[in-house]
Amino acid sequence: MSFFSVNNNCNGCLACVQNCPANALSHRDEESRRTLLHNMSLCARCGNCWRICPQKAVQFDGILNGAWDEVVTMELIHCTVCGEPLYTDGFKTALTGKLDYSLETLCPLHKKTFSLDAWRHLAFDDRTDEGSER
Amino acid sequence: MIVAEPKPLEEIALSIAGYKNVLILGCGTCVSVCLTGGDKEAWILADELITSKYFKDTPPSFSVQTIERQCEKDMLEVYLKMPPETDAVLSMACGAGVQTVSEIFKTLPVLPALNTTFLGALEETRLWREKCQGCGNCILALTAGVCPVSRCAKKLFNGPCGGSSKGKCEISQEVDCAWQLIIDRLEGLGRIEDYGRIIPSRDWSTDRGGGPRKLIRPDRDSSISKS
């Protein structure tokens, strides 16, 4: 999806491209077609395009209130009693390596002791001392 | 980046006491990055105020919004939707944002929730240090990239002073002597001879001594191509 969009007033004048301080707007002319391009990773969300567009064509709402992008999806481990999502499978594997016992798949409510131990280990995790037992 | 810190909760509560419907307005840029005035902090502040002990009477009802930049009047006018019945705005922007919101909503009190503190740089996670005072006449080219205006307690242009000891400033052992930093960096750059150059007295009218400043860029109009 594109965060940056224009309405039907856009006539391809490229005022937005010329005035974008972050060089986040560009265009491509191919044969009989002009395409407006936007790069969200460059966009500073300054609104200059919206501000200077002579056609009032820039729809800035999408940049201010854009939708969420899905980044990654992983397997979840749930509490075997109540089904509450606990952590991902990968998180369990990483944490189990730091503990001297296996994590039981129970939520804090159903197994307070194990859960507290796990979080205590996380809280004192030292990135400079990876893999060491505490 | 503009860095700000939260005002004490008691001071905030006192400033909004008596209002019934308060909009807590976060700002999505500088103060979000320095963890003081963004959307997350706006919601936290609402929770803290609701449960605070500082209201003698019923606390106001709070609504929370965050807008990308409170310092841009035209964008605020279009995109800030003021909830009905709002009788005060608690702005979590820097001073520029608070004043811009005030200019738009002429009949609403706009109250600051932050103390704007400095222009700084992120030194490490959750630590920002002042690096610039916006004096309007940058001399970093002469001082090896270390600013004596913002980082020397005396703003000396030809230092260090006698209060410099073992690389630290006399005001605190926590504070590096800016001129020691300048000398060390000049040595590192192989330009220590620049240290002998006397930096002349300057015209401070470009600083706040010349009154409120403004910037106009008539050269950057739509006829200028980025390429």
Image (spheres, coloured by chain):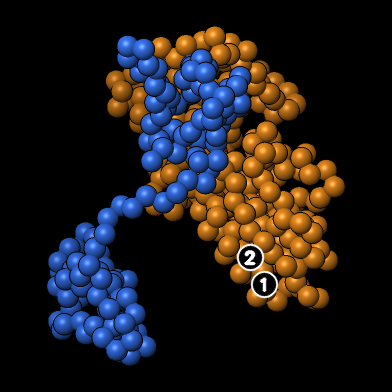
Tag 2 and tag 1, C-beta contact below 8 Å: yes
Percent across and percent down for residue B60 are 75, 68
The secondary structure type at the circle numbered 1 is helix
Q: Is residue A37 left or right of residue B47?
A: left
Q: In percent of the image, x 83 and y 43: which residue is there? A: B106
Q: Chain of mark 2?
A: B
Image: B67 above or below A85: above
Q: Which image quarter holds the C terminus of chain A?
A: bottom left
Classify residue B187 as left or right of residue B200.
left
- Looking at the rendering, which quadrant does residue B186 occupy? top left
Chain A tint in image: blue
Note whether A61 is above or below B160 in the view shown: below
- Circle number at residue A81: none
* Three-letter residue code for mark 2: Ala
Q: Nearer the viewer, residue A14 or A111?
A: A14
Q: Residue at x 62, y 12 (%)?
A: B218
Q: Say whether mark 1 and mark 2 are on the same chain.
A: yes
Q: Residue at x 41, y 29 (%)?
A: A38
Q: Which chain is orange?
A: B
Quadrant (top left/top right/bottom left/bottom right) for the N terminus of chain A: top left
Residue B193 visible to the viewer: no
Image coordinates of residue A65 in percent, x first then y, are 52, 46
Name the chain letter of the residue that bears numbered label 1.
Answer: B
Counting from the top left corner in percent of width and height, residue A32 is at 36, 12
Residue behind mark 2: B46
In this view of the protein, which residue sits in the foreground, A40 or B28? A40
Depth check: give the residue in front, B162 or B12: B12
Judging by the rendered image, the residue that carries numbered circle 1 is B50
